[in-house]
Image (cartoon, rainbow, N blue to C red):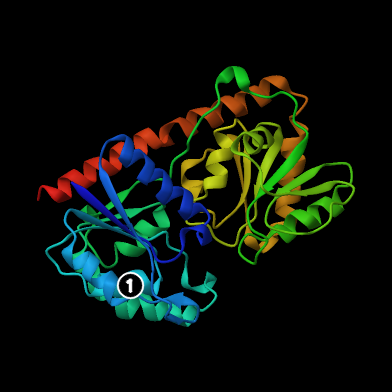
Amino acid sequence: MILNFVVGSNLKLFGGIQKHVNNIVSEMKVNKIHVELHVPNSRMKILNKPLPSLKDFFKLRESKGVIHFFGFTCLFVGILLRFTSKNKHIVYTPCMHPFYTHRFPILARFNFYLLLKPSLYKIDKILVLSQFEADFFSKYVHLDRISFIPSGIDEIISKNDISNKRTHFLFVGRDDDNKRMYIVEELAKLNPNLNFICVCNTNKSNSENIKYVTGLSDYDLKRLYQNAISTLIPSKYESFSIVALESIASGTPVIISENVQIKSMLPNKIMRLVSDSHLLEGFQSAINEFNGIMEDKVTLNEVSLTSLEIASVATWKKISDDHINIYKIIYDK
């Protein structure tokens, strides 16, 4: 069986989707399943979105095996799916963001309603990362064509590696309108006695209690997660949240905004959910709460153990096995 992965842009621009796709590819190779990755090779763009070339069309027309599309409003994906024949074995992972969160909401609606929606009948299985996506696509396809498979985690620390020395609050992500790192910066100003670390793409200078770092190794990032009091995720929207999963796999609870969709997987013991209408105040309250349990070793240990237990259901081995089962069912139809 050959897998054809079709993504809508250069993977380095995708952040969490990059990890998601790359890890699936790696696990397929471990299972000796051949994967071909299709990315835009055309220089033609509309509103900075790459368009398919004729070479892209012919590649997929001639391809054998399963075609797995990634991306909700990518013109590259939408156009290729629109003109892909019905008799292909097709899987689709939307990684969906609501229309209002897009830089060009009108373009996002155009791409879905004119390109993707008319093509949904061709898709054998839609793999969703959240209940929000499942609810959205169930309006257009039968529920038996929708499966929930979360993103996965590379490694979960052992119980013996749980840290009792928590020194900072952690933010991991881009400095942009969606990730809303400015909330963390405001919290740092309000809490001069607490330390904050932002792992991000910025040239900002460190201040007394906030440090900006970039270019970390996986080991160094894991250590930052392990030694954090909590990981802060104030995003406008996340279709899942690799950062939250990495955090709980390190035994560290999370504080997330209400539109971070991993929320359906996490119990209250390891998560504080903050309303967008009171974002700064909500994060402040949650910070106070988690900071308050640092001296209570019993409660801290319970939080860490629960975090590891939840993360254990989302190892890449389990996630890849779920993907392989779906690919085989579709391929053998």
Is 10 displayed left or right of 215 in the figure?
left
297 versus 31 height, above or below: above
Q: Give residue 319's position: percent from left, percent from top.
A: 36, 39
Residue positioned most to the left: 333
Q: Quadrant of residue 53?
A: bottom left
Is 104 displayed left or right of 167 in the figure?
left
Q: Give residue 278's position: percent from left, percent from top.
A: 69, 60
322 versus 280 height, above or below: above
Question: Which residue is located at x 44 percent, y 41 percent?
Answer: 152
Q: Give residue 209's position: percent from left, percent from top.
A: 86, 46
Q: Which of 299 and 10 is in front in this view?
A: 10
**What crowding class fits label 1: few (fewer than 14 Cα within 10 Å), some (14-19), or many (20 or more)?**
many
Whether residue 268 is visible here, answered yes or no, is no
Question: Which residue is located at x 14 percent, y 49 percent?
Answer: 331
Q: Nearer the viewer, residue 319 or 291?
A: 319
Q: Give residue 100's position: percent from left, percent from top.
A: 52, 73
Q: Which of 115 and 236 is in front in this view?
A: 115
The residue indicated by pointer 1 is 78
| Residue type, mark 1 in image | Gly
142 versus 112 height, above or below: above
Is 98 displayed left or right of 204 in the figure?
left
Q: Nearer the viewer, residue 150 or 80?
A: 80
Whether residue 118 is visible here, answered yes or no, is yes
